[in-house]
Amino acid sequence: MIDLKFLRENPDVVRASQVTRGEDPGLVDELLAADEIRREAIQAADALRNEQKSFGKKIGQAAPEDRSALLAGSNELKAKVKEAEEGQKSAEDKVFEIQMRLSNVVAGAPAGGEDDFIVLDTVGEPTTFDFEPKDHLELGTNLGLIDMERGTKVGGSRFYYLTGDGAFLQLGMMLLAAQKARAAGFQLMIPPVLVRPEIMQGTGFLGDHSEEIYYLERDDLYLVGTSEVALAGYHKDEIIDLRNGPLKYAGWSSCFRREAGSYGKDTRGIIRVHQFDKVEMFVYCKPEEAEVQHQALLAMEREMLAAMQVPYRVIDIAGGDLGASAARKFDTEGWVPTQGTYRELTSTSNCTTFQGRRLQTRYRDENGKAQVAATLNGTLATTRWLVAILENNQQADGSVVVPEALRPFVGKDVIEPKR
């Protein structure tokens, strides 16, 4: 949610942000007009309440014979106060409704859409082979790591089983991420995967992409597509202590996405599926610390990808491709040999105070005044990484070399085809 004071003082900045996102800049003027009506309604209600208070004192001081007439006037004034308070609430509700439709202000992201990202860095050379490489699903099936056929039989399309060493590959990756997170000062969390509507709304996921989210109507609960949602809600309506630095959490959970509108895209294998596991980093900090924390999250992601022995690149996502809550987002994309391109493996977003304001998460500044906290998130490991791990580490005989960092968890150096 955007800060109304910032909006009033910097309307052109917010309009430019809307244009960068490819969204309606007219929403800014709509909100400014609604805010003006809200402030006028508050002043009118306050004036009537003060008048009512003064009138009450006048009644208390009046002679008994005058009180009957004064009480009649008091009832008339009471009705006016009630009407004014109803007008105030209606004006406040209108402002809130528009605020919830306005995305976060873009900070430093390039303009444009999905294809207008800027490549910031490329690490490692794209993997090449002197044989015809297999894709991750063929490798996973031959090696007994992935079972899509039975996953579809049991759960429908885009479901799968990770079996045998495939399960250990994922568990090893997740455990390594958890260990690295703890060493970097993150508190590991296993959060709820079902959340209330106000938590999902507070993180900014119930806008244009709400069709991506599984909703359990009978229980009025949402299945999370990332543990960012539950971690953002962890300190809802709280004043947190940031005197000793940012609060850092790492959430390990299963995640669920409907993938609405993506039919025909990435239907083969486990690139785009309905259920997956993920370790997600989440940071609460003071707003002036957010950019430094953003770079720190990106550095953590880089460290994990290096351990997976996967060539990757870092891109700066364009404003039109940002989620509503992100002011800026960096993606890391791993090289997928059989597709001859880079595919998203992680993302890290600076959400500034957007989520903190919606969820009323605050901290006290050096003067003891409550201020809105900034929030950031970043993926440290997820199921999709298996695609890049398998394809980049395959050998001519169909075996896959296990990345050295995962060998203690998998229990072998090479995963070989079943004989």
Image (tube, rainbow, N blue to C red):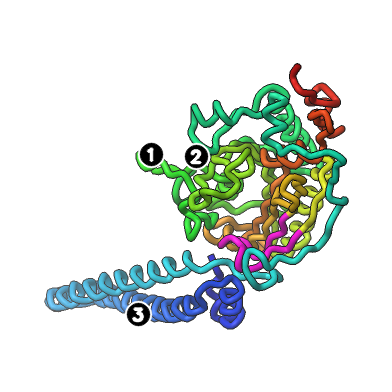
Mark 1 and mark 2 residues within 8 Å of each other at the beta carbon: yes
Determine whether, in the image, residue 404 is placed left or right of residue 297.
right
Residue 355 visible: yes
Residue that extends furthest to the top in the rendered view of this protein: 419
- Residue 133 is situated, as x and y percent measured from the top left of the image, at 78, 39
Determine whether, in the image, residue 104 is placed left or right of residue 126.
left
Asked if 312 appears above or below 82 in the picture, the reply is above
- Residue 219: numbered disc: 1
Q: Amino acid at mark 2?
A: Leu
Magenta segment boundaries in residue numbering: 315-331
* Badge nearest the viewer, 1 or 3: 1
Nearer to me, 124 or 230: 124
Determine whether, in the image, residue 83 is placed left or right of residue 231.
left
Q: Amino acid at mark 1?
A: Asp
Quick one: label 1, few (<14), some, or many (20+) residues within 10 Å? few
- Residue 26 is situated, as x and y percent measured from the top left of the image, at 48, 79
Q: CA separation, marks 1 and 2? A: 10 Å
* Badge nearest the viewer, 3 or 2: 2
Nearer to me, 22 or 91: 22
Residue under label 2, please give it: 194
Q: Amino acid at mark 3?
A: Ala
Q: Quadrant of residue 96?
A: bottom left
Residue under label 3, please give it: 44
Q: CA separation, marks 3 and 2? A: 42 Å
Nearer to me, 231 or 400: 400
Q: Is residue 38 magenta?
A: no
SS for tag 2? strand
